[in-house]
Image (cartoon, helix red, strand yellow):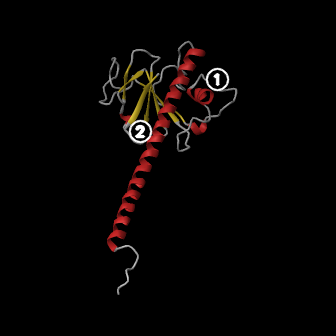
């Protein structure tokens, strides 16, 4: 009499391994996408905090004025404020310059989800548009060539601008500011004050 052996057939083992492999692929593909989406959501929250603090600065202390650039009231070049150079909680953070605004209004927790402090790139929208033409009429695109290589950790602050989709366009109101930031899962994000 033949005894029946207990165990799994080769087909059953192969089927279980195939199902387990499919589940592992879904986990390894899905988890990074989910975490990138969560980091982008945190970045959008940070951009809204930036806008909220800028509005607070304008309303509370300066009758609607923006922080001055290191080039004076009118920006003719790009001003770069590196987050690593900002000090927090010191008396000189009056908020009169963009660096002081960063230190006095945004705080030490204003960092990218990866732990890197944001940098500000302040530009005036009246420079050149993407085609090289003067962006001096309302609605002209002022997202110039410098934003083509936009990178993480750089917040582009466009003065005299408002958002139109993911780009910024010239605004006749000198107190309008558009900010643009690169996202992981999408091209970039533009928000208005």
The structure residue drawn at horizontal position 51% and vertical position 19%, both measured from the top left corner, is: 73
Residue closer to the observer: 15 or 154: 15
Residue closer to the observer: 101 or 15: 15
Q: Which mark is residue 150?
A: 2
The structure residue drawn at horizontal position 42% and vertical position 15%, both measured from the top left corner, is: 173
Q: Which mark is residue 67?
A: none
Q: Tell me the element at label 2.
A: loop
The answer to whether residue 116 is left or right of residue 134 is right
Q: Quadrant of the N terminus?
A: bottom left
Q: Residue 113 at what x, y percent from top left? A: 53, 41
**Quarter holding residue 126:** top left
Q: Residue 184 at what x, y percent from top left? A: 42, 42
Q: Is residue 84 visible?
A: yes
Q: Tell me the element at label 1.
A: loop
Q: Residue 36 at what x, y percent from top left? A: 45, 44
Q: Earlier in the sequence, mark 2 or mark 1?
A: 1
Residue closer to the observer: 153 or 44: 44
The structure residue drawn at horizontal position 63% and vertical position 27%, both measured from the top left corner, is: 104
Q: Are marks 2 and 1 in contact (CB under 8 Å)?
A: no
* Residue denoted by label 1: 94
- Extreme residue in the right direction: 91
The structure residue drawn at horizontal position 35% and vertical position 85%, both measured from the top left corner, is: 2
CA separation, marks 2 and 1? 29 Å
């Amino acid at each position: 009499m033949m005894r029946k052996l207990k165990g799994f057939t080769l087909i059953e083992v192969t089927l279980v391994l195939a199902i387990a492999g499919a589940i592992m692929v879904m986990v390894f593909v899905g988890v990074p996408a989910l975490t990138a989406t969560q980091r982008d959501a945190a970045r959008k929250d940070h951009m809204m905090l930036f806008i909220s603090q800028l509005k607070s600065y304008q309303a509370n202390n300066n009758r609607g004025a923006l922080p001055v650039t290191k080039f004076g009231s009118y920006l003719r070049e790009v001003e770069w404020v590196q987050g690593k150079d900002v000090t927090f909680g010191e008396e000189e953070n009056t908020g009169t310059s963009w660096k002081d605004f960063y230190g006095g209004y945004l705080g030490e927790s204003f960092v990218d989800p990866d732990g890197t402090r944001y940098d500000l790139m302040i530009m005036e929208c009246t420079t050149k548009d993407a085609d090289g033409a003067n962006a001096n009429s309302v609605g002209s695109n002022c997202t110039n060539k410098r934003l083509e290589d936009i990178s993480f950790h750089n917040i582009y602050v466009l003065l005299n601008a408002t958002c139109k989709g993911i780009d910024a366009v010239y605004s006749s109101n000198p107190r309008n500011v558009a900010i643009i930031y690169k996202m992981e899962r999408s091209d970039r994000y533009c928000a208005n004050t």
